[in-house]
Image (cartoon, helix red, strand yellow):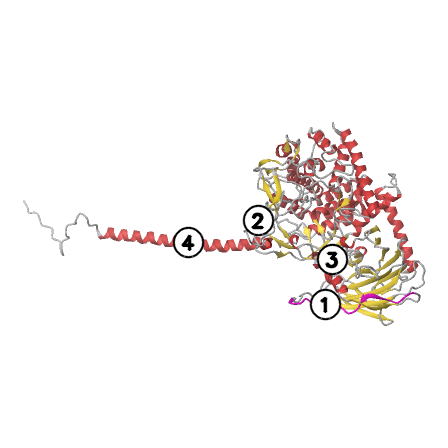
Amino acid sequence: MGRQRKRVVTGEATPPLRKEEKPTALLRKEKKKKLDIGKIFINISIGLCIFSLVWFFYALYMRSSLAKRVVTLHPSPPVLDANSTSAQVAPERFWGSYRPQVYFGMKTRSPQSIVTGLMWMRQFADVDVNLRHTCEQGDKLQSYGWLMHDGLSFGVQEIRDSDFTLTTEFVKRLGGEHGGDWTWRITAKQHSSAPHAPVISLMFYAAGDTQGSLEAHIEEKNRLGSLTGFSEELGNFKITFRKPVAGESSSVKYASYNYLQTVTPGLEKLTDIVRNSLNRRFVYSPPSGNKRQYIAVDTYKPPHHQHQQKPDDPRKESDFLLHQVTVQTPFQIEVLFESGSFRNRPNQLVGTSMTEELEKRKAEFDVKFEKTFGLQGKGFSQAQVKFSKAALSNMLGGVGYFFGQSVVQSVYNEYPLLYPEGTLFTAVPSRSFFPRGFLWDEGFHQLLLSKWDPQVTREVTAHWLDLINMEGWIPREQILGDEARSKVPGEFVVQRNENANPPTLFLALQELVEQLSTNPESASVTLPFLRRLFPRLQTWFAWYNTTQTGPLPNSYRWRGRDKDTNLFLNPKTLTSGLDDYPRASHPSVDERHVDLHCWMALSSGIMASVARLLEEPHQEYERTHLVLSDNNLLNELHWSDQLRAYCDYGNHTQAVVLQQEKVYVPPGQPRHQFPVARLVRSVRRAPKLQHVNALGYVSLFPFLLRILAPDSPKMEHILNDMKDPEKLWTPYGLRSLSKSNPLFMMRNTEHDAPYWRGAIWININYLAVRALHHYGNTEGPYREKAATLYQDLRTNIINNVYRQYAETGYIWEQYNDSSGRGQGSHPFTGWSALTVLMMAEQY
């Protein structure tokens, strides 16, 4: 048997492992594992840092991008071509009374126009310097306003000052390449009650707006006989100041002359420049009568502000020339503008030539007015027809052309930004108080102007929509240019992009669409206009439909309510257009606003109509319109069984009052060193989510915008509330808030008088009359009741607005619910002029 061999291993023998020891390979493996975890941790940390940096810079980029959106215009092609308002494209509209903020003045529809205007002053008066220029309620004129104005070629205005009347007339004549010629005629007559014939100084001026040049031509030592000028838009031109004559005769009257030649840093400075150039050293020396010192322009002396370092104005200075003529009434003066490119004019537009041309235009105006509105055929008196012509003419004469930049802000901007420069051709609510564009007013203005001249409505609507930004937002108050900004309190200058205004321009579009059926020839201009407008309309509607949504599906909420609830009896909602109308006492995201719901129902229906006309996709707009017009949804969201009316919904309590706050003054301390006690709001019962018990204009919106079905049982409650004198009915129109409401005619703050809390407003009354006319001519159980109410309400409004005009010389912003007296700003020939459509029964 063989022997077993023993295995030999070279080298040291491996010592036996202890129980607690591990193999080296395992150690290395564990060490590697720890290193891997560390690397992973480090990589994750680095990744998180990179991600955080990327996210940080992306957030910065997005915030910067979002911040720029508010001042980025809509990307679609503008509705209007860049030269659409030029003398070459629209010569008949180039010159016009497009300076509604002054008593009498003209400019062109170009961004930096040469402007012309009139100032005047009564000499030897009790008030030392009573200079008139910009329309001011503080001037306390007996009346002023256009009696006739066709919006194109002529206008006649009457201004009644203390003891004399100025009649301002202008007429245009086309010719050449720069808009042609025009002539002014100013006629001054004393009132029959004046004991002495007043001596008046008229001051005619021309001024550049950052461009153009003017040259004075002096005659007889100190009379500015004429001026010549040049600008890019006007080419060469000449303005001649003719001597005053005695009324209609041709005999020249004695007059004293002065002139001022200087520069201006801005059009808003013109009044101050003239005021600071006045001197009493001149002598008025008529052939018969006593010599008297009078006040006239001399050398401009800028006011000296002691201890005040005035920064240099960065704006370019422009030429400013003024011709002053001082003469005793009665007299007549003509000012003639002649375009250098009008080479074959038949004669000068002065004297009998101007008279003949003016009479021709007046006759054409009368014929067109009757053809358009038919008031004589409806049996109105000559005085009432004259009033209605003045109402329309004042709206046409209140159309302005503005250029400048809005000041806007979004939540992504730390400070306000300047909006891109833009132009706006628009009517204004009031020449004295609101001589600028307001988005929700303009839709009402165009309801009247579209009947007279649809082209004006197309151009105005296009100008507004061309100001839309990429978000679909239009600044609701247009304060363009320094002249416009000088009339606006600082708190209202900045426009915020979450804030809306009622989209009333859809009412004007609805009118243009309806005109297609009655006037098929208008399709050739209206359809191309709508096609260019449509991309902007889509974005505009979508902006409302996304930014103004409410807490529930298909509900809506106005943004921009006042947030300082401590100072307001009921925080205002300026964005709704109804300012201090009572909403939920405690603003919250839970609010639902019935008027905005109805505006969206109306707008979606008009969007569907426009889309169908253009053969664009319209189904989504129709679905939205059907949903929002569904009376069951409307009832579910806004009907209050308790009030038996449509209402807002929100966090609300009625138990709120304004009371004097308590200011603690330590014993022995002087009271004047401590804050003045204010009126602050006291909440006596906690608010809760509920319908807002405020019966008034907001409650009527389903009816006003004709969303309500003719056979709806809610109609009976609405008609009864309208007819109830203890609620909305007055002999002068519907009051804005029920007489039985606790906030009726209550001040909203210590300093804010009631505004939409009882007064009668013509725009809402027009919608009410229009709705009554609709339901009074539509089959339904309430047809007869609506028809009767229509006749009564229409008659009351027309009679009162006319009576107040006859008594006061003005159409007013609002009317007192207990007396019918006109109140607020005046003249207010914005939406108050809708009285003309009620007279004509054109809805």
The range drawn in magenta is: 289-309
Where's residue 205, x and y in %?
Answer: 80, 63
Instruction: Report the disc number at residue 83.
Output: 3
Residue 741 in the image: above or below residue 440: above
Tell me: 805 left or right of 209: right
Where's residue 399, x and y in %?
Answer: 77, 52
**808 and 306: which one is in front?**
306
**685 and 92: which one is in front?**
685
Residue 749 in the image: above or below residue 294: above
- Label 3 vs label 1: CA separation? 38 Å
Element on which disc 3 rests: loop
Q: What residue type is labelled 3?
A: Asn
Tell me: 129 left or right of 662: right
Q: Does the magenta stretch include residue 302?
A: yes
Element on which disc 2 rests: loop
Tell me, yes or no, whether the two marked residues, 2 and 3, touch with CB atoms within 8 Å.
Answer: no
Element on which disc 1 rests: loop
Q: Which amino acid does label 1 sit on?
A: Pro
For the residues carrying marks 4 and 1, which lies nearer the camera in this image? 1
- Label 4 vs label 3: CA separation? 55 Å
Q: Image quarter for residue 275?
A: bottom right
- Report the residue marked by disc 2: 663
- Label 2 vs label 3: CA separation? 62 Å
Q: Earlier in the sequence, mark 3 or mark 1?
A: 3
Bin the neighbour count of mark 4 within 10 Å (Cα to Cα): few under 14, some 14-19, many 20 and up: few
Tell me, yes or no, whether the two marked residues, 2 and 4, touch with CB atoms within 8 Å.
Answer: no
- Main SS category, magenta section: loop
Q: Earlier in the sequence, mark 2 or mark 1?
A: 1
Q: Image quarter for residue 689?
A: top right
